[in-house]
Image (tube, coloured by chain):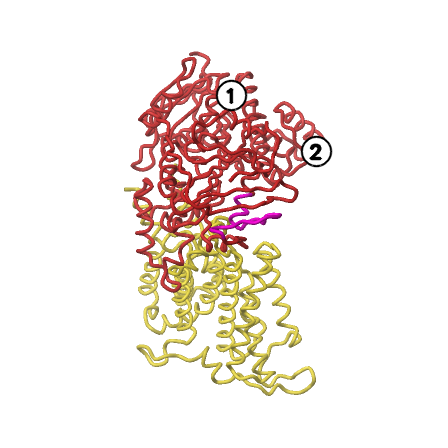
Chain colours: A yellow, B red
Amino acid sequence: MNDRLLDFAIRYGFLILLIGLIVYFSLAAPGFFGPLSAAFVLQSVAITGILALGVTCTLVVGGFDLSIGAVATSALMLSAYSMVILEHPAPVAVALCLAMGALVGFINGLLIVKFRVPDLLATLGMMFLLIGLQRIPTQGNSIATGMMLPDGSVAEGTFSAAFLWLGRHRFDVVIDRLLPMPVVIFVAIAVLIWLFLGFTRHGRLMYAIGSNARAAALVGTPVNRYKIAAYMISGVTASIGGILLAARLGRGDIASGNNLLLDSVAAALIGFAVLGVARPNAFGTAIGALFVGILLQGMTMMNAPYYTQDFVKGAVLVAALVFTFYLSSRRTGTGH
Amino acid sequence: MAGDALKVNGLQKSFGKNHVLRQIDLTLSPGSVTVLMGANGAGKSTLVKVICGHHRADGGTMTLAGSAFEPTDAADAIRKGVVTVHQSIDDGVIPDLDVANNLMLDSLVDRGHGLFVRERHMRAEAAKVAAAMGIDVNLRARVSDLAVADRQMIAIARAMARAPKVLILDEPTSSLSATEADRLFALIDRLRDQGVAILYISHRMSDIRRIADRIVVMRDGAISGVFDTDPLDYEAAVTAMLGHRMTDVDVAVQNGTKPVLELQDLQLFANAAPINLAAHDGEVVALVGLLGSGKSRLAEILFGIARAAQGQIRINGKDYAPRSVEDAVAQGVFMSPKDRGTNAVIPAFDIADNMTLPFLQGLSVGSFLKARRQRSKAQEMIDQLGIVCQSVGDGINTLSGGNQQKVMIARWLLEPAKVLLLDEPFQGVDIGARRDIGRHIRATAPGRATLVFLAEIDEALELADRIIVMNEGAIVGEHANQNIDLAALVADISGAKPIATGTAT
């Protein structure tokens, strides 16, 4: 009986806690329960959620990608540079960013697979490199229409309407202009990655690599190719996050996106605890991101000061990790 | 007896509804080796874990040298004088430190030890310990660079530095070759003379014959037999373990039909003698030899992990030179590797996913897996091999060693192979599971050539149609498994005969 209770707690504890939170905030904070508030929460987690889904793929193969935040801000700067200074149309800017994300992922993968650099260190190095690189073309300045260029001329390009649409368009659901475009993209990517990791043979092999890479190699899995692919997925999703951020802000803001890395890694790690699977999974990651978003929204509506936010996120993460590693190990540790 | 080192009385342990140990009584005397036998799942490992402090007992008492013994954790058990060397050697050593540091590690943990490491003093002490144990390796070598046997010796030496009253060895020879095992036995003899009570857990009859003073047999969580008459009745011990008599397996020798796998002047490494060998359809060929004889190298070459220095391989008359494991599998050459824990088991997966891993492509539409088909395939193999489990969805680590190994073998029987390579398929497997696996391999042999790489002669005799002996990368002997001349076979293995150019057909 005790065992079954523990099992139930591990599996559904986090989801029950999430529902409990929603009920509590709905009662305590007027206006929390409603479509506008929901859309706001989703909007606030969409971009970190997209990054978190990418990092989930690298966690699945037993790796880690610390460069996602930097990839996202690089994509932000690159799209702005491409449109404002090089005066490219929106599709070109988007394509450039996606290609950049894929390339960074590929290089990360090569560093790890071919040059045997440990994943944390390789992606940490890449993070530094990108943070530095994105500042060089503009000499450390943000990019906006009408800015002064180094040669004295004025930047003529603008963020095209089509590009801004990606970040700002709102679909009519229940209320007019409710659901933001980034949320739709977040949900779409979440579904795609969920299907990919959970239901395709490629996903299954990636989990096998994460669990025992040697055994996976000895059944004929091209381990290196899958690892590189995982980092490329992570790079591409991070660049999508950066594009959406740029489209929302409408300028290449050098200072934005500081929190992206930590928030998205936290979401992915909290995801371990959802459903008690104790391993990276797309559903858990999405719920993890949502959990943090709901908690912060509810607290904000109850007038908690903004500077408590990081503390709350940290506390949730630590609780989720204890949940994952302590409780789940107690459950599986009862073999002989 | 008053001088008992360890006395266990009415020990009980359950995990949930599962009663793993029921009323275990066990006595270990100083200066004697007690062998603990039992099929996988009989409760040996759990008993060891209770004695060495990993698990708490649910009932019963233990006394160590006359006083109550209730270890709170593993460190406490060690402090009180019960030291265990576990099956996975790397639990017993720190791979990144050198030999001297490993040998002296426990003294570093000591609270009496000063803040700074006295390097020279420590190395001198380490040298003393090594000499006392007969360990002859460079004390500055990193442990991760040493051979398995040396690592094992170091793990034991470390344990002995504690001067324990009771030493528990859990399948210490499972990854050792015969000569290496001999060194281990010599060490055990020495420890016995020093008055240590030794509990030795093993499946290997040859080990047991060599060192047992007394045999205790477990079955279904209880002691099913204690044998201490001189001479020991091994037959009865095996019977007590299995619950039925051990009958010698009779192999109906098949010569096979057409040759499937042909090796022509194959050199395993530069300057090795060339190998010529043909394995036929329906035939099970055992390759035996000591560690370092080239068996593993040959398996790796055939499976696309390593490259041969020279020579040709042909399968069904066509040249075969796999570039990778992927390539080998695609061409119908499958291998079940040795050391399933590191090389085969995916611990996060259930039985179905573990078993079907190499053949997911055939079990999916486009990229999407057909979960039901995967499960039904796995269920078929479970039934055929008699894998004991609740369902195909059981986590692989909930299974006993023998059943895990059955899953690993079943993995490669899902699809028809042209050449099936089995590297140490009976490693850490009890006799019951070993018979099941052997029977199934023989039953499915027609349609492919089967090569089995083994260190134990008994296992080869039980399974193979033909036994090929390897030594130093060459074939040194060939024996059909019929009225076999055991003395000649052993002489081949130990390298008594000079190496001739292999000409087995």
Circle 1 SS class: loop
The amino acid at mark 1 is: Lys
The amino acid at mark 2 is: Glu
Q: Which residues are magenta?
A: B298-317
Residue at 39% x, 79% y: name it: A170
Figure quadrant of residue B216: top left
User: Camera-side residue: A300 or A215?
Assistant: A215
Q: Does the magenta-highlighted stretch encompass residue B302?
A: yes
User: Camera-side residue: B37 or B160?
Assistant: B37
Looking at the picture, how far across and down is residue A13, in whole percent? 34, 53
Circle 2 SS class: helix
Looking at the picture, how far across and down is residue A302, in whole percent? 39, 65
Q: Does the magenta-highlighted stretch encompass residue B452?
A: no
Q: Which mark is residue B119?
A: 2
Q: Which mark is residue B165?
A: 1
The first of marks 2 and 1 along the sequence is: 2
For the residues beneath circles 2 and 1, the answer to whether they share a chain is yes
